[in-house]
Amino acid sequence: MPKIIIAVDGYSSCGKSTTAKLVAARMGYTYIDTGAMYRAVSLYFVQNQIPINHPKAVRDALDHIQIAFQINSGTGRNETCLNGLNVEEEIRKMYIANFVSEVSALPQVRHAMVAQQQRMGRKRGVVMDGRDIGTRVFPDSELKVFMTADTFIRAQRRQIELLGKGEVVGLDEILENIRKRDHIDTTRAESPLRKAEDAVELDTSYMTIDEQVEWVIHLADQRIAELHRKGHFKLKEK
């Protein structure tokens, strides 16, 4: 069966990454966490004291950043590697969350990461989540999903996630972080977060992860069947 690209965009803490991972696993697709890529760049900048207001320093730093994903044999999780080191736990910490929107708004960073993401998805059969997948990275993706949720619910989810990792953060601080990220993501000049015209919106405020996964897979199956009927895949395979 021919495969498609599923682009999952939306706000932070809406369940994008978890849903995208499970959809990819169920469909036998490759999962690409673009948010983790920007977090890895942010970590590198922090560790190497790269001034983000200095374009040449940013450009030079990007030449020394290699990001890859590996499957943890014990947990089966898709984990992020920065220059050969597993940084999955570190990039999920709050100090990176407070910095990543500023880093990902830099044109040089976005250009470098978008180029990597496009190479990763060239053969299709991928589920990619982020903030500009359907609008910038893969505007021709066959299925675009835009996820949203109530801000307070998003903050609660993020707090539970952090507690599970032993990081205690107040709800007010998390709410402030989410609102700040939303503002930067939606107003930045380079690839702002927005819903693609042909994206299907999914409000996850009162949905379980299983319900989200089933919803996306159902849409994907419908889209594949529709494209197959129209002969779309025959054209793609020539």
Image (spheres, grey):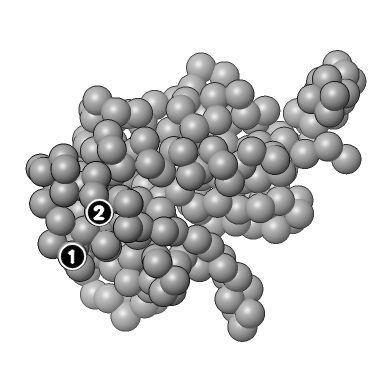
Q: Earlier in the sequence, mark 2 or mark 1?
A: 1
Residue 155: where, in percent of width, then height? 30, 54
Q: Give the vertical position of 141 relative to 103 (above or below).
A: above
Q: Amino acid at mark 2?
A: Ala
State the residue position of label 1. 48
Query: Do labels 2 and 1 touch, CB within 8 Å?
Result: yes
Q: Quadrant of residue 149?
A: top left
Q: Does residue 86 appear to the left or right of 173 in the view shown?
A: right
Q: Position of residue 50 (x, y in %)?
A: 15, 56
Q: Secondary structure at mark 2?
A: helix
Q: Which residue is mark 2?
A: 61
User: Which residue is painted at 86% across and 16% down in the image?
Assistant: 230
The crowd level at tag 1 (other Cα within 10 Å; few <14, some 14-19, many 20+) is: few
Residue 168 lies, with reference to residue 31, above or below; the image says: below
Q: Amino acid at mark 1?
A: Asn
Q: Residue at x 79, y 25 (%)?
A: 236
- Which quadrant holds the N terminus? top right
Q: Quadrant of the C terminus?
A: top right
Dividing the picture into quadrants, the one containing residue 160 is bottom left
| Residue shown at the point (70%, 58%) measured from the top left | 25
Mark 1: secondary structure: loop
Residue 212 visible in the displayed image: no
Nearest the eye: 215 or 1: 1
